[in-house]
Amino acid sequence: MILKGKTALVTGSTSGIGLAMAKAMAAQGANVMMNGFGDAESAIAEVKAYGVQVDYHGADMSKPDEIAQMITATEKRFSSIDVLVNNAGIQHVANVEDFPVERWDAVIAINLSSAFHATRLALPGMKQRNWGRIINIASVHGLVASMQKAAYVAAKHGIIGLTKVVALETANTGVTCNAICPGWVLTPLVQKQVDARAEREKISNDAAKHALVSEKQPSGEFVKPEQLAALAIFLCGADASEVRGAAWNMDGGWTAQ
Ligand code: NAD
């Protein structure tokens, strides 16, 4: 129970990786502020099952004023934000010349700028208490590129840069900032890409999953949200106090190639 009495704010925690992060934080005793769209009710119930206090804020992470309201509401409800997991994200796939400008702006706002806003607002309290963990869910696409993902790759490279700057600016404090860089994880965000591939190539969903993973990940296996959450818990612990500014990949060998 390394987070007993602490508070974790996990953005985009109604499904996928964010939900696994919220559950892992709760399992370590943290109270959790959840956020995201979709089926919030059942996600909240899953986290509450760990016997901690759970609340939900519906901030749209593309809107800086709503992010500010969420930070204030979390500090008011739980009196601190000790762990901030910047996880909310979206994807859009198109060649650069066809990339809708509105989709570019949305991906940059949700996958990159939201982390800047949440961090700049949560950091003063963390510095004051001289303890904090900021964990940015980047991607292998923060380290390498793929075609048709201009906005996503730009945002994820950007969030790794942000991670390093925040790590330097907090280096003499008890606050650390790191990024986790997952390879393929089978979440709703990726299921959409599997469905599109099955449709395009007239193959089964299982065949599309296999094709998608094996073309990038030598292991041929998806990374599990729970494995990423276990890494986040390590980053929260005392043994990780000198892990600062890392971009830690868990990607079945994707970026080793
Ligand atoms: P997901 O679609 O299951 O979860 C995304 C979450 O973000 C959901 O809770 C969703 O409601 C929320 N969200 C989306 N737009 C939002 C907005 N405007 N305001 C608030 N919440 C919003 O996807 P996931 O795969 O779990 O993705 C989580 C993070 O992990 C993302 O940053 C993604 O880029 C990253 N990631 C995913 C993979 C993968 O293979 N699934 C790989 C690398 C990185």
Image (cartoon, grey):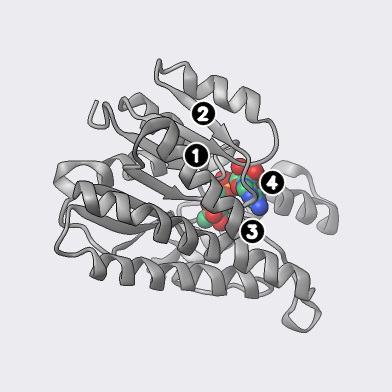
Verify CB contact (< 8 Å) between mark 4 and mark 1. Answer: no
Quadrant of the rendered structure where residue 160 is?
Answer: bottom left
Mark nearest the camera among 3 and 1 is 1
Q: Which residue is drawn at 55% across and 70% down?
A: 155
Q: Which residue is drawn at 23% across and 63% down?
A: 170
**What residue sits right under mark 2 in the picture?**
55
Q: Distance between the residues labelled 4 and 1?
A: 33 Å
Give whichever of discs 2 and 3 has the lower sequence position: 2
Mark nearest the camera among 2 and 1 is 1
Give whichever of discs 4 and 1 has the lower sequence position: 1
Give whichever of discs 3 and 1 has the lower sequence position: 3
Q: In the picture provided, is 247 more to the left or to the right than 68?
A: left
Give whichever of discs 2 and 1 has the lower sequence position: 2
Q: In which quarter of the image is the N terminus?
A: top left
**What residue sits right under mark 1 in the picture?**
73
Mark nearest the camera among 4 and 3 is 3
The residue carrying pointer 1 sits among few (fewer than 14), some (14 to 19) or many (20 or more) residues within 10 Å by Cα, namely some
Q: In which quarter of the image is the C terminus?
A: bottom left
Q: Distance between the residues labelled 3 and 1?
A: 18 Å
Q: Which mark is residue 62?
A: 3
Q: Which mark is residue 191?
A: 4
The local secondary structure at tag 4 comes to helix
Verify CB contact (< 8 Å) between mark 2 and mark 3. Answer: no
The local secondary structure at tag 3 comes to loop
Q: What residue type is labelled 4?
A: Gln
Q: Which amino acid does label 1 sit on?
A: Ala
